[in-house]
Every structure is written in C-alpha cells, then in structure tokens.
Amino acid sequence: MLTQLTAAETAAKLRSREVGAVEVAQAHLDRIARLDPEFKAFLTVHPERTLAEAEAAQKRIDAGEAGPLTGVPIAIKDNVSTEGVPTTCASNVLKGYVPPYDATVVSRLREAGLVSLGKTNLDEFAMGTSGENSAFQVTKNPWGRDLVPGGSSSGSAAAVAGELAPLSLGSDTGGSIRMPAALCGIVGYKPTYGRVSRYGLVAFGSSLDQIGPFGRTVEDAALLAEAVSGYDPLDSTSLDVPPVSTEALKDGNVRGLRIALPRQFMGEAIQSGVREALEAALDVLRREGAEVSEIDLPSVAVGVTTYYIIAPAEASSNLARFDGIRYGGQVEGDGHIGVVASTRGGLFGHEVKLRIMVGTYALSAGYYDAYYNRAQQVRAVMAAEFETAFQEFDLVVSPASPIVAFPVGGLSQDPLALKLLDLCTIPANMGGFPSLSIPCGYADDLPVGMLLNGPVGQDERLLQAAYAIERALPWGYRRPPMP
Ligand code: GLN
C-alpha cells in the first residue's frame, strides 16, 4: 500500500517512475477521507490544491528536476501560516483567518516539491500536552481510538502514525513534537533553536519555539529537516549556518557512543513500563558497544516550574495581538476596550486564558524579578549543566514521555499532572539544543519513546546517532493496529 511507505521509499519510487505523484497524493487523500472522520487529525484538507501540487511535482520529476522529497505528501500543523489556507491555531480567536503569506518553512516545502495535504489539529495555540485543548476537536491516537495522541502537535503526530501522511511538521516549545511522537510511536525531532526559521509560525514562547519534522523513520525526519532548515533573513533569531545535512546519516554505528542517563529522568515520575522499556533498549545498545553512564543533572527538578513561568510570560506578550480587530473573530462590546475584552474573554479557551494571566502576573512590576528574572537564571543554570554533560557524552538520553498514551479525558481534570509530563522534553527548549524522540519499545502494547539530546548545533551528529540506534533496535517501529 502506498500509504505505508516511508517518505524516502516513496521518493525513490517516484523518481524511478514506479508510481506517479498524483497517484501517491490520491492514495493519501482517500485514506484521509476514510479514516480521518475517526482520527480527527486534520482541521483542513484541500484535495484540489493537493492534486494541483502533485501534478506540478510530477512535471518536475518528468523534467529530471526532482529533489530528495519531490512529490512526497506532507501535513502541516495549523499554527504555521499558509497563504490562502485557513490557519486557526485550533482557536476560536483565529477561526476563519486566512493568512496572506506563507511561513518560510512552507515556501521551502514548495521549493522542494513536497505536496501539502492540509492543516493538522493542535492544542489551542500549541498550549497543551494531550491535544485535548483544541477548540474544535480531539485527535485520537491510532494506537487506540480512546487514547490521546499527545500534544500539542496532536494532529501532525496522529497523521503520520495513522499513515494519513508520510511526513508532517509540528512545533515544539516544551516538547510538543517529541511528546506526541513518543505516544504515537514515531520519530519527532526538534532541531537546534534557530536552524529552522520561525517566520510564519504563530508565536507562543518565542525564545523556546522551534518548528520540526515528524516521520516514521529517522531518515524521513532528517530529510524533511534538510528541506526546511537553513538561514532565513526574515527571522532575526535564525542561525546563519547551512541547512541540516543528511549526508553523514548512514555512517557509523552505536559502538563507542557515549550515552549519559540522568538519574533525574528515571525517578518515580516515570511509569515502570516506560522505565523498563528504556532500560531494555539501553541494554541492547550496551551490548552493541555503546557506553551508558548514569549522571546527575540537578536543575532538571525545577525545569517544569521554570518553563511554566517563561513560556506563559512570553505567550502573554505574543498573544496580545489577538484583539478581535486585526485577525479572525470578533465579539461585540462597548467601545474599543469592550470589543477587545469580549473577544479575548469569549474566544480564547480556558488554558490559553490561564497562561495569559499567569504570564502577565509574572511580568508585572514588582513580580518581574521574583519570577521571570529568576526563571531566566535557572534556565541559564540548566543550559550550563547540559553543556557540561555534552563535553563528556555524545548524547543525554531519557524517556520522551514519563507515561504511555492515556485515555481521552483521563488527565484533563488534572492540569498539574499534564504539565509534569513535560519533565524530560523541556530542557532542550530551555537550552536550545537539538532533541529527538524515537520509538524504543512497548509498555502495555503502547509505544515508548526514547529521547536523545545532543549539543547545540550538532544536529547532524544527533541524527546520525539516532539512525544507528534505530538500526540497533529493530523492533522499535511498529504499525499501530489499524486498517
Ligand atoms: N506541553 C507544553 C505546554 O503546554 C509544551 C507545549 C509545546 O511544546 N508547544 O506548554
């Protein structure tokens, strides 16, 4: 079945003319039509646009001008700006908003000849860990229709795991790519901060946000990163370095790989099945010649607390622009202030309002030093601790999520428990370093993700190590039980 192929396999079959780009696109559109009413991964699909892009890709293939992913379909998280296609952030505040411009990543996808299938569901403004904060629908995990796919990039992860798309883009502020990748049993990669342009990504926590790929293999995720990364003058935090290269991906194995396992990531917060799966995977890597050492990273204990000051603080400022006047929906009110108040009060969801209030509080005069500044100091300590670890080790590993996929509604009454699930993923955003989750085993027949963290700017080495680890753990990727 065409929808079961990896992106790399699809691209190879397209180049050898074994299949056509329109046929590949149609196979995915058919599967979306059949299964997405159940998965609810997409907020927008646009079959006509998809088929037109597929035809254009085919012309390039026929002309011998195909790149590594030309003609391969992709789904895009709905907080990434797409010209002429609604971009809602799964919020009533942006319902009906159609952007007049493409995000840089979207322009690059077009240049590379990928074929866009549509826009995927998320927690409203990417604030959440389960996908349940979407104002429109709850995406289901292909591993169990009563289970959450993880968040906030819920739709992008479910689309790839459910074979509705071979590739997708998500965004990661505190784990929103890696967490759902773990819960859905696929690969999710947050590049080094600045390697992928944020131009056109609706901002949540600008110093933490990063766009990144989902795929069913490390190679697929790396190929997509290669296509969308690289310097962008439109993003002032963009790094002036070449795109992520996949050239060295296949060299090397796990022999001699120096892996650090911080004790703070293997404590009580981690479900026993997850811990066991990770230990078993690390045992295999040891047998294959990797060195695994336990280390201490004490600052990790305050990571979640620190993140939940910095991220809401930045969000409260970023979301000030949604005032009912410039974008999307508007609720009537008394005068200018009245319109702004009733729009923001009426159209933002509960979690978003909570964060705006927490963030505004943390930034207000008198509290700024006690909360925001203090959090920034802790952030620097955390980044330094990891940097020190990377001087001695190639990778710092942990579970990506402390628990496997859980039932819809299971934790939504317990916002604190949900936030604590970000324990392992937050440091990479705080320190800006690259981090990736790959499937490493199963607990209760549900996927467990191994989180691999590498030093800032060393994305290629991280991907190379991940590729070798994926080879060493051949049971890692499994298809979910689905049609
Ligand atoms: N779960 C985290 C939060 O709710 C991370 C979200 C993200 O990475 N966008 O803030």
Image (cartoon, rainbow, N blue to C red):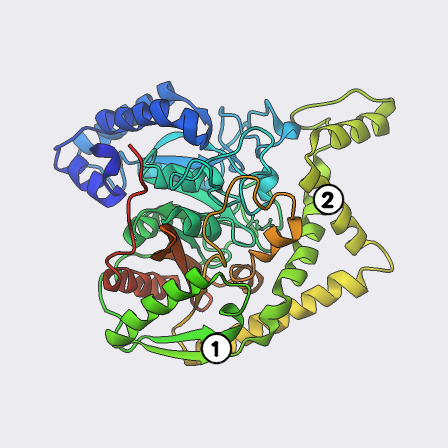
Point out the frontmost of discs 2 and 1.
2
Lateral position of residue 321 relative to residue 186, left or right? right
Q: Residue at x 27, y 24 (%)?
A: 26
Q: If the image is split into quadrants, where does the N terminus sit?
A: top left
What type is the residue that disc 2 sits on? Leu
Which of the labelled discs sits on residue 354, or is there none?
2
Q: CA distance from mark 2 to mark 1?
A: 35 Å
Does residue 34 lie above or below 142 as drawn? above
Lateral position of residue 434 relative to residue 347, left or right? left
Q: Residue at x 51, y 68 (%)?
A: 265
Q: Earlier in the sequence, mark 2 or mark 1?
A: 2
Does residue 143 lie above or below 348 as drawn? below
Q: Is mark 2 within 8 Å of ligand 1?
A: no
Is label 1 in a helix, a strand or a loop? helix
Q: Are marks 2 and 1 in contact (CB under 8 Å)?
A: no
Residue in the foreground of this view, choosing between 29 and 31 = 31
The residue beneath circle 1 is: 389
Residue 31: x, y in percent? 31, 27
What type is the residue that disc 1 sits on? Ala
Lateral position of residue 112 relative to residue 379, left or right? left
Does residue 45 lie above or below 377 as drawn? above
